[in-house]
Image (spheres, rainbow, N blue to C red):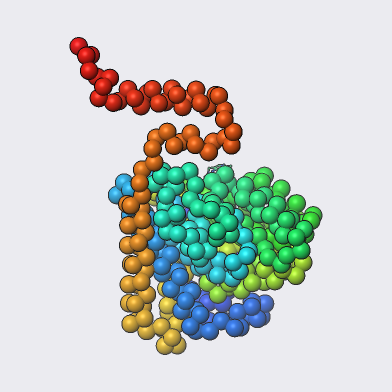
Protein backbone atom coordinates (compact mmCIF):
# COMPACT_ATOMS: atom_id res chain seq x y z
CA UNK A 1 0.00 0.00 0.00
CA UNK A 2 1.43 3.33 -1.02
CA UNK A 3 1.26 6.58 0.93
CA UNK A 4 0.18 8.56 -2.10
CA UNK A 5 -3.05 9.79 -0.59
CA UNK A 6 -1.53 10.70 2.74
CA UNK A 7 1.20 12.42 0.74
CA UNK A 8 -1.14 14.97 -0.72
CA UNK A 9 -3.70 15.33 2.09
CA UNK A 10 -4.16 18.97 3.00
CA UNK A 11 -1.56 20.00 0.45
CA UNK A 12 -3.84 20.83 -2.45
CA UNK A 13 -4.34 24.51 -1.62
CA UNK A 14 -3.62 27.14 -4.18
CA UNK A 15 -0.11 28.07 -5.04
CA UNK A 16 1.06 31.07 -7.01
CA UNK A 17 1.96 30.39 -10.61
CA UNK A 18 3.21 32.31 -13.66
CA UNK A 19 3.83 29.42 -16.07
CA UNK A 20 1.28 26.61 -16.19
CA UNK A 21 2.16 22.92 -16.47
CA UNK A 22 1.56 23.19 -20.24
CA UNK A 23 3.85 26.19 -20.64
CA UNK A 24 1.32 29.00 -20.81
CA UNK A 25 2.27 32.34 -19.22
CA UNK A 26 -0.43 33.49 -16.81
CA UNK A 27 -0.62 36.76 -14.89
CA UNK A 28 -0.53 37.12 -11.17
CA UNK A 29 -0.93 40.62 -9.69
CA UNK A 30 1.30 39.90 -6.71
CA UNK A 31 4.15 38.23 -8.59
CA UNK A 32 4.15 39.99 -11.98
CA UNK A 33 5.88 43.20 -10.82
CA UNK A 34 8.85 41.18 -9.55
CA UNK A 35 9.68 39.69 -12.95
CA UNK A 36 8.48 42.45 -15.28
CA UNK A 37 12.10 43.06 -16.35
CA UNK A 38 12.83 39.44 -17.31
CA UNK A 39 13.38 39.25 -21.07
CA UNK A 40 13.01 36.18 -23.29
CA UNK A 41 16.81 36.00 -23.46
CA UNK A 42 17.00 35.88 -19.68
CA UNK A 43 14.33 33.18 -19.56
CA UNK A 44 16.41 31.18 -22.04
CA UNK A 45 19.36 31.53 -19.62
CA UNK A 46 17.21 30.13 -16.80
CA UNK A 47 16.18 27.27 -19.10
CA UNK A 48 19.84 26.62 -19.89
CA UNK A 49 20.74 26.60 -16.17
CA UNK A 50 18.05 24.02 -15.51
CA UNK A 51 19.20 21.82 -18.40
CA UNK A 52 22.82 21.99 -17.22
CA UNK A 53 21.92 21.26 -13.60
CA UNK A 54 19.79 18.27 -14.61
CA UNK A 55 22.72 17.01 -16.69
CA UNK A 56 25.11 17.41 -13.73
CA UNK A 57 22.65 15.48 -11.60
CA UNK A 58 22.30 12.69 -14.18
CA UNK A 59 26.07 12.39 -14.52
CA UNK A 60 26.63 12.26 -10.77
CA UNK A 61 23.92 9.60 -10.44
CA UNK A 62 25.66 7.58 -13.17
CA UNK A 63 29.03 8.00 -11.45
CA UNK A 64 27.50 6.55 -8.27
CA UNK A 65 26.00 3.62 -10.17
CA UNK A 66 29.42 2.96 -11.71
CA UNK A 67 31.02 2.81 -8.27
CA UNK A 68 32.86 6.13 -8.60
CA UNK A 69 30.83 7.95 -5.93
CA UNK A 70 29.75 6.46 -2.63
CA UNK A 71 26.40 8.25 -2.62
CA UNK A 72 24.49 10.99 -4.44
CA UNK A 73 21.27 12.84 -3.51
CA UNK A 74 19.47 13.56 -6.80
CA UNK A 75 17.60 16.81 -7.36
CA UNK A 76 15.71 15.59 -10.44
CA UNK A 77 12.43 17.53 -10.65
CA UNK A 78 13.56 20.36 -8.36
CA UNK A 79 15.50 22.38 -10.95
CA UNK A 80 13.08 25.33 -11.10
CA UNK A 81 13.00 25.71 -7.30
CA UNK A 82 16.77 25.80 -7.15
CA UNK A 83 17.56 27.88 -10.23
CA UNK A 84 14.71 30.37 -9.76
CA UNK A 85 15.74 31.12 -6.19
CA UNK A 86 19.53 31.01 -6.60
CA UNK A 87 19.48 33.29 -9.66
CA UNK A 88 17.60 35.93 -7.64
CA UNK A 89 20.54 36.26 -5.23
CA UNK A 90 23.48 38.65 -5.22
CA UNK A 91 27.04 37.39 -4.74
CA UNK A 92 27.15 38.97 -1.26
CA UNK A 93 24.07 37.10 -0.04
CA UNK A 94 24.95 33.94 1.87
CA UNK A 95 23.43 30.49 1.34
CA UNK A 96 23.05 27.75 3.95
CA UNK A 97 21.78 24.56 2.36
CA UNK A 98 21.16 20.85 2.80
CA UNK A 99 22.75 18.07 0.74
CA UNK A 100 20.26 18.37 -2.14
CA UNK A 101 20.96 21.95 -3.31
CA UNK A 102 23.57 21.06 -5.89
CA UNK A 103 21.77 23.27 -8.42
CA UNK A 104 22.08 26.20 -6.03
CA UNK A 105 25.79 25.44 -5.57
CA UNK A 106 26.20 25.48 -9.35
CA UNK A 107 24.63 28.95 -9.52
CA UNK A 108 26.88 30.17 -6.70
CA UNK A 109 29.85 29.17 -8.88
CA UNK A 110 31.08 26.05 -7.14
CA UNK A 111 33.95 24.22 -8.80
CA UNK A 112 32.51 20.94 -10.14
CA UNK A 113 35.24 18.82 -8.59
CA UNK A 114 34.60 20.49 -5.25
CA UNK A 115 30.94 19.59 -5.64
CA UNK A 116 31.77 15.92 -5.94
CA UNK A 117 34.73 15.26 -3.66
CA UNK A 118 32.76 14.61 -0.45
CA UNK A 119 30.50 12.12 -2.24
CA UNK A 120 33.59 10.24 -3.43
CA UNK A 121 34.86 10.04 0.14
CA UNK A 122 37.90 11.99 -0.92
CA UNK A 123 37.61 14.86 1.58
CA UNK A 124 35.51 15.77 4.57
CA UNK A 125 34.50 19.09 3.06
CA UNK A 126 33.97 20.40 -0.44
CA UNK A 127 34.88 24.06 -0.71
CA UNK A 128 35.78 27.28 1.09
CA UNK A 129 32.38 28.77 2.03
CA UNK A 130 33.66 32.34 1.77
CA UNK A 131 34.78 31.93 -1.84
CA UNK A 132 31.22 31.48 -3.11
CA UNK A 133 29.25 32.70 -0.08
CA UNK A 134 27.66 29.33 0.43
CA UNK A 135 28.27 27.05 3.39
CA UNK A 136 29.07 23.41 2.65
CA UNK A 137 25.98 21.16 2.80
CA UNK A 138 24.39 20.44 6.15
CA UNK A 139 23.42 16.81 6.72
CA UNK A 140 21.76 17.39 10.11
CA UNK A 141 18.21 18.06 8.99
CA UNK A 142 17.29 21.73 9.48
CA UNK A 143 20.40 22.79 11.41
CA UNK A 144 21.37 25.23 8.66
CA UNK A 145 18.33 27.39 9.46
CA UNK A 146 19.99 28.27 12.78
CA UNK A 147 23.27 29.08 11.02
CA UNK A 148 21.46 31.28 8.49
CA UNK A 149 19.56 33.09 11.22
CA UNK A 150 22.76 33.75 13.17
CA UNK A 151 24.49 34.97 10.02
CA UNK A 152 21.52 37.25 9.29
CA UNK A 153 21.83 38.75 12.77
CA UNK A 154 25.43 39.57 11.83
CA UNK A 155 24.27 41.25 8.61
CA UNK A 156 21.80 43.30 10.62
CA UNK A 157 24.46 44.35 13.13
CA UNK A 158 26.83 45.32 10.31
CA UNK A 159 24.10 47.50 8.80
CA UNK A 160 24.52 45.69 5.46
CA UNK A 161 21.72 45.04 2.97
CA UNK A 162 22.56 41.46 2.03
CA UNK A 163 20.47 38.47 3.05
CA UNK A 164 20.97 34.95 4.35
CA UNK A 165 19.03 32.12 2.73
CA UNK A 166 18.32 28.79 4.39
CA UNK A 167 17.28 25.95 2.06
CA UNK A 168 15.54 22.96 3.63
CA UNK A 169 12.93 20.33 2.88
CA UNK A 170 9.36 19.60 3.88
CA UNK A 171 10.49 17.09 6.50
CA UNK A 172 12.82 19.65 8.06
CA UNK A 173 9.86 21.86 9.02
CA UNK A 174 9.07 19.34 11.78
CA UNK A 175 12.52 19.72 13.33
CA UNK A 176 13.09 21.72 16.50
CA UNK A 177 16.02 23.56 14.92
CA UNK A 178 13.85 25.02 12.14
CA UNK A 179 11.15 26.14 14.56
CA UNK A 180 13.70 27.66 16.93
CA UNK A 181 15.34 29.49 14.03
CA UNK A 182 11.99 30.95 12.99
CA UNK A 183 11.23 32.13 16.54
CA UNK A 184 14.61 33.83 16.76
CA UNK A 185 14.43 35.31 13.25
CA UNK A 186 10.98 36.78 13.94
CA UNK A 187 11.98 38.15 17.35
CA UNK A 188 14.96 40.02 15.99
CA UNK A 189 13.52 40.68 12.49
CA UNK A 190 16.72 39.52 10.83
CA UNK A 191 17.21 39.45 7.03
CA UNK A 192 16.81 35.70 6.48
CA UNK A 193 14.78 33.78 3.92
CA UNK A 194 13.43 30.38 4.88
CA UNK A 195 13.26 28.60 1.53
CA UNK A 196 11.41 25.31 1.86
CA UNK A 197 11.45 22.93 -1.08
CA UNK A 198 8.38 20.83 -0.46
CA UNK A 199 9.32 17.85 -2.64
CA UNK A 200 6.53 15.81 -1.02
CA UNK A 201 8.77 13.26 0.67
CA UNK A 202 11.17 13.02 3.60
CA UNK A 203 12.79 9.74 2.58
CA UNK A 204 9.72 7.44 2.81
CA UNK A 205 7.55 9.79 4.87
CA UNK A 206 4.91 11.71 2.89
CA UNK A 207 4.42 15.43 3.48
CA UNK A 208 0.80 14.84 4.52
CA UNK A 209 2.14 13.22 7.66
CA UNK A 210 4.37 16.22 8.41
CA UNK A 211 1.49 18.67 8.25
CA UNK A 212 -2.25 18.72 7.65
CA UNK A 213 -2.04 22.31 6.41
CA UNK A 214 0.23 23.71 3.68
CA UNK A 215 3.72 24.19 5.08
CA UNK A 216 3.65 27.91 4.25
CA UNK A 217 0.82 28.19 6.78
CA UNK A 218 3.23 27.30 9.56
CA UNK A 219 5.14 30.57 9.12
CA UNK A 220 2.11 32.62 10.20
CA UNK A 221 2.38 31.14 13.68
CA UNK A 222 5.78 32.77 14.03
CA UNK A 223 4.61 36.07 12.54
CA UNK A 224 6.67 35.48 9.40
CA UNK A 225 5.05 36.46 6.06
CA UNK A 226 5.03 33.63 3.54
CA UNK A 227 4.37 32.76 -0.08
CA UNK A 228 3.39 29.36 -1.45
CA UNK A 229 4.52 29.08 -5.06
CA UNK A 230 4.62 26.46 -7.77
CA UNK A 231 8.14 25.19 -7.28
CA UNK A 232 8.22 23.76 -10.80
CA UNK A 233 7.69 27.25 -12.21
CA UNK A 234 11.04 29.01 -12.47
CA UNK A 235 9.47 32.47 -12.95
CA UNK A 236 7.17 32.15 -9.94
CA UNK A 237 10.10 31.03 -7.79
CA UNK A 238 12.26 33.90 -9.05
CA UNK A 239 9.47 36.38 -8.27
CA UNK A 240 8.83 35.01 -4.78
CA UNK A 241 12.54 35.07 -3.93
CA UNK A 242 12.83 38.67 -5.15
CA UNK A 243 9.84 39.54 -2.93
CA UNK A 244 11.57 37.98 0.08
CA UNK A 245 14.91 39.63 -0.77
CA UNK A 246 13.28 43.04 -1.07
CA UNK A 247 11.82 42.56 2.41
CA UNK A 248 15.18 41.44 3.80
CA UNK A 249 17.17 44.28 2.21
CA UNK A 250 14.77 46.97 3.38
CA UNK A 251 14.67 45.90 7.03
CA UNK A 252 11.41 43.97 6.64
CA UNK A 253 12.73 40.91 8.46
CA UNK A 254 12.37 37.21 7.69
CA UNK A 255 10.20 35.60 5.00
CA UNK A 256 9.16 32.03 4.32
CA UNK A 257 8.75 30.55 0.83
CA UNK A 258 7.19 27.15 0.22
CA UNK A 259 8.16 25.97 -3.26
CA UNK A 260 5.84 23.10 -4.12
CA UNK A 261 7.82 20.62 -6.17
CA UNK A 262 8.48 16.91 -6.40
CA UNK A 263 11.48 14.65 -5.86
CA UNK A 264 11.27 12.55 -9.03
CA UNK A 265 14.19 10.30 -8.14
CA UNK A 266 15.12 8.36 -5.02
CA UNK A 267 15.95 10.12 -1.74
CA UNK A 268 19.56 9.18 -2.42
CA UNK A 269 21.12 6.54 -4.64
CA UNK A 270 20.85 4.19 -1.62
CA UNK A 271 17.04 4.43 -1.62
CA UNK A 272 14.38 2.54 -3.61
CA UNK A 273 11.24 4.71 -3.76
CA UNK A 274 9.19 1.99 -5.51
CA UNK A 275 8.91 0.38 -2.07
CA UNK A 276 6.84 3.21 -0.64
CA UNK A 277 5.22 5.30 -3.36
CA UNK A 278 2.88 4.72 -6.27
CA UNK A 279 4.14 4.85 -9.84
CA UNK A 280 1.05 6.94 -10.73
CA UNK A 281 2.22 9.74 -8.47
CA UNK A 282 5.48 9.98 -10.38
CA UNK A 283 3.61 10.02 -13.69
CA UNK A 284 1.38 12.88 -12.47
CA UNK A 285 4.45 14.93 -11.63
CA UNK A 286 6.24 14.06 -14.84
CA UNK A 287 3.50 16.04 -16.58
CA UNK A 288 4.48 19.08 -14.48
CA UNK A 289 8.15 18.95 -15.42
CA UNK A 290 9.85 22.28 -14.71
CA UNK A 291 12.08 22.25 -17.79
CA UNK A 292 9.53 21.05 -20.37
CA UNK A 293 7.09 23.85 -19.52
CA UNK A 294 9.66 26.63 -20.02
CA UNK A 295 10.76 25.02 -23.27
CA UNK A 296 7.12 24.94 -24.44
CA UNK A 297 6.64 28.61 -23.52
CA UNK A 298 9.83 29.75 -25.27
CA UNK A 299 9.25 27.57 -28.33
CA UNK A 300 5.77 29.03 -28.77
CA UNK A 301 7.17 32.56 -28.97
CA UNK A 302 10.09 31.49 -31.13
CA UNK A 303 12.61 32.55 -28.47
CA UNK A 304 13.94 29.01 -28.30
CA UNK A 305 14.67 27.17 -31.53
CA UNK A 306 15.61 23.50 -32.05
CA UNK A 307 19.12 24.64 -32.97
CA UNK A 308 19.45 26.51 -29.67
CA UNK A 309 18.16 23.49 -27.75
CA UNK A 310 20.78 21.32 -29.41
CA UNK A 311 23.49 23.83 -28.57
CA UNK A 312 22.38 24.00 -24.93
CA UNK A 313 22.26 20.19 -24.68
CA UNK A 314 25.79 20.02 -26.10
CA UNK A 315 27.02 22.61 -23.60
CA UNK A 316 25.43 20.57 -20.79
CA UNK A 317 27.21 17.44 -22.05
CA UNK A 318 30.45 19.40 -21.87
CA UNK A 319 29.80 20.30 -18.23
CA UNK A 320 29.02 16.64 -17.46
CA UNK A 321 32.29 15.61 -19.12
CA UNK A 322 34.23 18.07 -16.96
CA UNK A 323 32.45 16.78 -13.86
CA UNK A 324 33.41 13.19 -14.69
CA UNK A 325 37.01 14.12 -15.48
CA UNK A 326 37.29 16.05 -12.20
CA UNK A 327 35.86 13.15 -10.25
CA UNK A 328 38.11 10.49 -11.79
CA UNK A 329 41.13 12.76 -11.48
CA UNK A 330 40.87 13.11 -7.72
CA UNK A 331 43.91 11.69 -5.96
CA UNK A 332 43.11 9.37 -3.05
CA UNK A 333 44.14 10.93 0.26
CA UNK A 334 46.70 9.20 2.49
CA UNK A 335 44.79 7.12 5.09
CA UNK A 336 46.43 8.99 7.98
CA UNK A 337 45.18 12.32 6.63
CA UNK A 338 41.92 11.54 8.43
CA UNK A 339 43.62 12.70 11.65
CA UNK A 340 44.54 16.11 10.31
CA UNK A 341 42.43 19.15 11.25
CA UNK A 342 40.39 17.30 13.89
CA UNK A 343 41.75 19.60 16.61
CA UNK A 344 43.51 22.93 16.23
CA UNK A 345 46.02 22.00 18.98
CA UNK A 346 47.84 18.69 19.75
CA UNK A 347 45.65 16.10 21.45
CA UNK A 348 47.23 13.05 23.14
CA UNK A 349 44.11 10.93 22.85
CA UNK A 350 44.00 11.43 19.08
CA UNK A 351 47.78 10.93 18.80
CA UNK A 352 47.45 7.51 20.48
CA UNK A 353 44.78 6.55 17.94
CA UNK A 354 46.99 7.70 15.10
CA UNK A 355 49.97 5.66 16.40
CA UNK A 356 47.74 2.61 16.68
CA UNK A 357 46.43 3.11 13.16
CA UNK A 358 49.97 3.60 11.78
CA UNK A 359 51.03 0.27 13.32
CA UNK A 360 47.96 -1.36 11.82
CA UNK A 361 48.77 0.03 8.36
CA UNK A 362 52.40 -1.05 8.69
CA UNK A 363 51.11 -4.60 9.24
CA UNK A 364 50.21 -4.70 5.55
CA UNK A 365 53.74 -3.92 4.33
CA UNK A 366 55.81 -6.74 2.75
CA UNK A 367 58.50 -6.75 5.54
CA UNK A 368 56.18 -8.04 8.23
CA UNK A 369 55.30 -11.21 6.29
CA UNK A 370 58.99 -12.26 6.07
CA UNK A 371 59.98 -15.10 8.36
CA UNK A 372 56.45 -15.90 9.22
CA UNK A 373 57.09 -19.62 8.88
C1 LIG B 1 18.48 15.55 12.66
C2 LIG B 1 18.41 14.48 11.62
N1 LIG B 1 17.46 13.51 11.74
C3 LIG B 1 17.37 12.55 10.79
C4 LIG B 1 18.24 12.51 9.73
C5 LIG B 1 18.11 11.43 8.66
N2 LIG B 1 17.56 12.02 7.45
C6 LIG B 1 18.34 12.30 6.39
S1 LIG B 1 17.48 12.97 5.11
C7 LIG B 1 16.03 12.90 5.97
C8 LIG B 1 14.74 13.39 5.34
C9 LIG B 1 14.70 14.85 5.09
O1 LIG B 1 13.56 15.21 4.34
P1 LIG B 1 13.29 16.67 3.85
O2 LIG B 1 13.55 17.64 4.93
O3 LIG B 1 11.94 16.68 3.23
O4 LIG B 1 14.42 16.91 2.74
P2 LIG B 1 14.64 16.14 1.35
O5 LIG B 1 15.57 15.00 1.62
O6 LIG B 1 13.33 15.69 0.85
O7 LIG B 1 15.29 17.14 0.44
C10 LIG B 1 16.24 12.32 7.23
C11 LIG B 1 15.16 12.08 8.19
C12 LIG B 1 19.23 13.53 9.67
N3 LIG B 1 20.11 13.58 8.67
N4 LIG B 1 19.28 14.50 10.61
MG1 LIG C 1 11.42 16.43 1.22
> Which of the 4 image quadrants contains residue 170?
bottom right
Left or right: 316, with 30 as reference point: left
Q: Who is closer to the viewer here, 280 or 288?
A: 288
Query: Residue, x 36% and y 43% (percent of image)?
Result: 332
Q: How many marks?
A: 0
Q: Is residue 370 above or below residue 270?
A: above
- Residue 319, image x, y percentages: 37, 65
- If the image is split into quadrants, where does the C terminus sit? top left
Q: Is residue 144 above or below residue 300?
A: above
Q: Is residue 298 above or below residue 319?
A: below
Query: Residue, x 37% and y 23% (percent of image)?
Result: 360
Q: Residue furthest right?
A: 187
Q: Who is closer to the viewer here, 96 or 32?
A: 96
Whether residue 265 can be seen here: no
Q: Residue furthest top?
A: 373
Q: Residue furthest left?
A: 373
- Residue 298, image x, y percentages: 45, 82
Left or right: 184, with 66 as reference point: right
- Residue 197, image x, y percentages: 56, 59
- Residue 248, image x, y percentages: 71, 66
Q: Who is closer to the viewer here, 224 or 93?
A: 93
Left or right: 125, with 328 as reference point: right
Query: Residue, x 57% and y 44% (percent of image)?
Result: 140
Q: Residue furthest bottom?
A: 302
Query: Residue, x 74% and y 55% (percent of image)?
Result: 153
Q: Is residue 112 above or below residue 33?
A: above
Whether residue 340 can be seen here: yes
Amino acid sequence: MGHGEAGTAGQGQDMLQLITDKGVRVSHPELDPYIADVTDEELVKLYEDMVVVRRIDTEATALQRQGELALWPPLLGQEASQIGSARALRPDDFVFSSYRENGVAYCRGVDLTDLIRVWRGNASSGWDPYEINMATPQIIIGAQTLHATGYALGIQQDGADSAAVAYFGDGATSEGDVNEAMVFAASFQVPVIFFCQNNHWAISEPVGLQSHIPLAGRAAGFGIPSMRVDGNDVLAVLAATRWALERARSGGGPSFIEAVTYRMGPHTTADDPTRYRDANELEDWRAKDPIARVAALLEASGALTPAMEEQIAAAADGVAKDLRAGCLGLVDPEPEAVFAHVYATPNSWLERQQEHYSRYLAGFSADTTEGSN
